[in-house]
Amino acid sequence: MIELLYCQRCGSPVKQLVPAGDNRPRAVCESCEHIHYENPKNVVGCLLEWQGKVLLCKRAIEPRHGFWTLPAGFMENKETTLEGAAREAKEEACAECENLRLFAVYNLPRISQVYMMFFGRLKDGYADVGEESLEVGLFRQNEIPWDDLAFPVVTETLTRYFERKQDRIREVHYADIYSRPGAPLEIDRHPTG
């Protein structure tokens, strides 16, 4: 995270201190006393299926340019999580979603992000390259480029999906992911039932 040096309200310098009634350091303006709270970013995405295959996008942007991912990205203001997931599928893969439902919630405390991944059907099986993708494709489990997936959350989502597909389990998966790309997955899975 970028350390805040100046107040977003008045432009005066800020300092790190624990405000009265709080329990952790915050950036506080030395002039207008505004407290700047930093909160986790919400990321929404979806795993779309068509005839036993799942949609993946090859990233055209950093981080992890050239690696495969599920369509996902930061939520925008004034949209729901479901709307955001559908928007990301449209932006990254020109894909329309059907029957989206919450599939998994992942906490990534190392980078202050919360992922909400949805599962649904790829409408008409149609996808095409969007602005943030080099290519898109539909993959069966044995065709997925597992070694070229962009992020641990993508690997975890796909792994849980294929496990649950065979078991026909329908509850929402919930886990904390502590690893970074290229490192072994460190996951603390939580019971959901």
Image: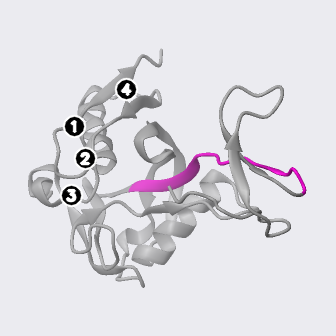
Q: Amino acid at mark 2?
A: Thr
**Which type of secondary structure does the marked residue at label 4 adopt?**
loop
Q: From which residue to which does the magenta span run?
A: 32-47
The residue indicated by pointer 4 is 169
Residue indicated by mark 2? 155
- The amino acid at mark 4 is Ile
Instruction: Give the residue type that dot 3 points to.
Output: Leu
Numbered badge on residue 149: 3
Height in image: 11 above or below 183? below
State the SS at label 1: loop
Residue found at x 42% / y 74% = 92
Magenta stretch containing residue 46, yes or no? yes
Residue pictured at 45% horizontal, 52% vertical: 120
67 part of magenta stretch: no
Q: Residues within 10 Å of mark 4 (few under 14, many from 20)?
A: few
Q: CA distance from mark 3 to mark 4?
A: 24 Å
Please name which of the two marks, 1 or 3, marks the residue nearer to the observer: 1
Whether residue 182 appears in this view of the structure is yes
Regarding residue 96, the answer to whether it shows in the image is: no
Report the side of 122 relative to 11 (left or right): left
Sequence-wise, which precedes: disc 2 or disc 3? 3
Residues at circles 2 and 3 in contact by the CB criterion of under 8 Å: yes
Q: x, y (%) of residue 173? A: 42, 30
Q: Nearer the viewer, mark 2 or mark 1?
A: 1
Q: Earlier in the sequence, mark 2 or mark 1?
A: 2
Q: Earlier in the sequence, mark 4 or mark 2?
A: 2
Q: Which dot marks residue 185?
A: 1
Residue 135 placement (x, y as % from top left) = 26, 80
Residue 5 in picture, x, y percent from top left: 65, 62
Q: What crowding class fits label 2: few (fewer than 14 Cα within 10 Å), some (14-19), or many (20 or more)? A: some
Q: What amino acid does circle 1 point to?
A: Leu
